[in-house]
Amino acid sequence: EPEVMWNMRTLFMQKSKSRKPGWPQPYWRANG
């Protein structure tokens, strides 16, 4: 469901920003 995916993405983005700025390249590479 798109809504769940969006929520998970938002949570991940928030966590990523909280830890360090920028996108988690390794994560995207692993899933991309």
Image (tube, rainbow, N blue to C red):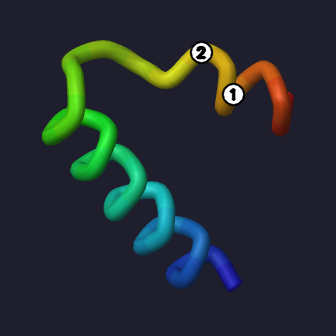
Tell me the quadrant of the picture where the N terminus can be found: bottom right
Task: Relative to 15, say whether 30 is above or below.
Answer: above
Q: Residue at x 83, y 38 (%)?
A: 31
Question: For the residue carrying disc 1, how many other residues have a C-alpha within 10 Å: few (<14), some (14-19), or many (20+)?
Answer: few
Q: Position of residue 2 (x, y in %)?
A: 62, 75
Q: Position of residue 12 (x, y in %)?
A: 41, 53
Q: Residue at x 52, y 81 (%)?
A: 3
Q: Residue at x 69, y 27 (%)?
A: 28
Q: Which residue is mark 1?
A: 28
Tell me the quadrant of the picture where the C terminus can be found: top right
Amino acid type, label 1: Trp
Tally the numbered discs: 2
Q: Secondary structure at mark 2?
A: helix
Q: Position of residue 5 (x, y in %)?
A: 59, 70
Q: Which residue is mark 2?
A: 25
Tell me the quarter of the picture where residue 26 sits.
Answer: top right
Amino acid type, label 2: Gln
Q: Secondary structure at mark 1?
A: helix
Q: Which mark is residue 7?
A: none
Task: Relative to 30, say whether 4 is above or below.
Answer: below
Task: Relative to 5, say whether 19 is above or below.
Answer: above
Q: Is residue 4 left or right of residue 21?
A: right
**Residue at the left extreme of this rendering:** 18
Contact (CB < 8 A) between labels 1 and 2?
Answer: yes
Q: CA distance from mark 1 to mark 2?
A: 5 Å
Of 14 and 7, which appears nearest the observer?
14
